[in-house]
Image (tube, rainbow, N blue to C red):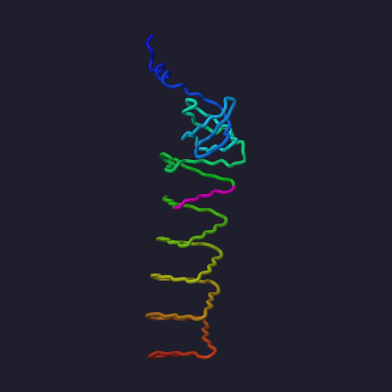
Amino acid sequence: MESTPADYLTRLSPPAVHHFGTVLSVADGCYIVGGDWGSLSTRRAASCQLLPEPGDLVLISGSLPDQAYLIAVLERRGPAPLCTSLGEEVSLRVEGPGRLSVQAAQSLSLKAGDISIVGRTGRVLLAEIQACARQAVFSLQTTRMIGDVFESSLGRLSQFLGSSQRTVKGLDQTRSGDIDCRSEHTIQLHGQQVFVTADKLVRLDGDQVHIG
């Protein structure tokens, strides 16, 4: 009776087997898994994204004992948190007009050397926000800010504007050590009452001075 291709492959390599086991130790990407059948050195399969920890109940598969892979973590039995390793180059893609949602009940942390976010629109809804950066650069066409209280504490503030307009309903107060206000053309002060006082000197200097 002639051998089929499947029979020929079976004679060349032993059939793959599956075993339950417990991770005994982890070192340099090698996982020692033990069970009723003894202990075995395995490698984590690319499809097993959850990093195994000592004490975990796992499933191993392969041609024993030379090509054994840890293919799944079935149960986390220790106190270590769940950790996923995706390799060096990873792309997460949602095909078509799909959606991707990431949710956490307590906290969500992102850490990277460089973070880029590209989208058509963006929304951030937070009860409180804190930001700390050595340098920040914003390039905006239109900016609107609506709030109840705005406070800033700066060592230096420089602004270069094409035009500026401000409306204050209540009191507008400025306190400074020195104030230098200059205009290339006209400065106009107007009010129902205008008071200019000085402890030592008030000086008006111009080609023409009109009072009244």
The foreground one among 191 and 42 is: 42
Question: Where residue 124 sits in the image (x, y, percent)?
Answer: 51, 53
Which residue reaches farthest top? 1
Indicate whether 186 appears above or below 114.
Answer: below
Task: Name which residue lies at 46% across and 28% down.
Answer: 67
On the question of residue 212 being in view, the answer is no
Magenta segment, which residues?
106-113
Left or right: 202 with respect to 75? left
The image quarter containing residue 204 is: bottom left
Task: Name which residue lies at 58% across and 28% down.
Answer: 35
Left or right: 120 with respect to 173? left
Indicate whether 141 appears above or below 86.
Answer: below
Main secondary-structure element of the magenta-colored stretch: loop
Question: Where residue 76 sits in the image (x, y, percent)?
Answer: 59, 36
The foreground one among 201 and 107 is: 107
Q: Is 199 inside the magenta-drawn segment?
A: no
Quadrant of the image containing the N terminus: top left
Task: Name which residue lies at 50% across and 71% down.
Answer: 155
Task: Name which residue lies at 45% across and 52% down.
Answer: 113
Question: Where residue 176 sits in the image (x, y, percent)?
Answer: 52, 78
